[in-house]
Image (spheres, rainbow, N blue to C red):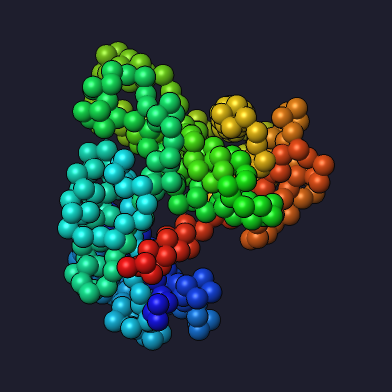
Amino acid sequence: MSSSRVLVLNSGSSSVKYQLLDMRDSSRLAMGLVERIGEESSRLKHTPLASGGASREWTGPMADHEAALKAVSAELAKDGLGLDSPELAAIGHRVVHGGRHFTEPTVIDDAVLAEIERLIPVAPLHNPANLTGIRTARHLRPDLPQVAVFDTAFHTTMPESAARYAIDVETADRHRIRRYGFHGTSHAYVSRATAKLLGKAPEDVNVIVLHLGNGASASAVRGGKCVDTSMGLTPLEGLVMGTRSGDMDPAVIFHLMRVGGMSTDEIDTLLNKKSGLIGLCGDNDMREIRRRIDEGDQRAALAFDIYIHRLKKYIGAYYAVLGKVDAIAFTAGVGENAAPVREAAVAGLEELGMVVDGALNAVRSDEPRLISPGHARVAVAVVPTDEELEIATQTYALVGRI
């Protein structure tokens, strides 16, 4: 393929994140963010990485996503990288929910758009924004291949025993209720990168991936394929997160409705935006929580302990699911940067073969690295995630086959 560039778009309800990559060497040519779309104070920050130039910022009204993408195109054009460049091979779009239908990256056409729209009831916060970005990009470059890469796709290899909830089958099927999982591009990238770090092929490695950011999820990956993951029908299930509760007795919801008099929307807001670390101690920044702990703050200490307790439960559960574990990989903002979290998560698991070397764990680096001693039976790794590169790689591989 003569064209080698891929533009990756991650469209939110009022924002667009983007990166332009050259797939000949996976280098980043430019990146940026448009936020507050639809407001008078819309803001675009653009960084031309290829030229090493300084970031440029623009503030002013952007009525909609089309205006935002036109502004992005104008900034790229200043660096000779515009959307009309013949070097642009495709646009890759992050789409949060692909349901059971989309198991791999997919070239977007009207039928694909209709299916993504059909999934809005199970992803009401994300799929509408993703669709807006796709439609806008197709309008601006109708001649260019556009590819959807789904957060849920990596998890579609889960067996039914892991994916199904133990509720009435007909009801579940009618309303598409099952575990879909999220952060799939990250789990796919990190599991492969961990195998590479160990000098092995992905199909020869069993990995527990811990994607720990403001949103957090765990996955059990056997031979390169996901066999279980912590998030479910929505990103609410699983680990304790920055503002989400994670696992909880479903009857709490009924109790809040009957006894607390709370509405469905109020409970939704509580569990998704006012729970997790921020609900437990008022902070969802792990750095601030650790600072408070160092100052003797008991509420912060309890929040940290609850966070770690849940993390340990999933590590142990996925060890049991996999039977044999070659590595555990920490990734995303907290996983990559919070050494105390990594140390506490593995502490006491020596009988499972997991040990963290204190000196290695304290090292700050942007490179994949092992933080376990050489004699450890299970490698403990820190692997920076790269979801944009994963989306670009999958997009470029697909359009190269067209």
380 lies left or right of 68:
right
Report the number of discs.
Answer: 0
Residue at 28%, 69% in the rendered image:
145
Q: Position of residue 49 (x, y in %)?
A: 50, 77
Residue at 22%, 67% in the rendered image:
138
Residue closer to the observer: 120 or 250: 120
When the figure is inspected, residue 10 is found, relative to residue 372, above or below; the finding is below
Image quarter of residue 18: bottom left
When the figure is inspected, residue 391 is found, relative to residue 214, above or below; the finding is below
Residue at 78%, 40% in the rendered image:
376
* Quadrant showing the C terminus: bottom left
376 lies left or right of 323:
right
Q: Position of residue 206 (x, y in %)?
A: 61, 41
Residue closer to the observer: 94 or 73: 94
Residue closer to the observer: 263 or 239: 239
* Quadrant showing the N terminus: bottom left
Q: Position of residue 25 (x, y in %)?
A: 53, 74
Image quarter of residue 118: top left
Residue closer to the observer: 309 or 44: 309
Residue at 37%, 63% in the rendered image:
398
Q: Position of residue 173 (x, y in %)?
A: 25, 28
Residue 276 in view, yes or no? no
The residue most toward the right is 375
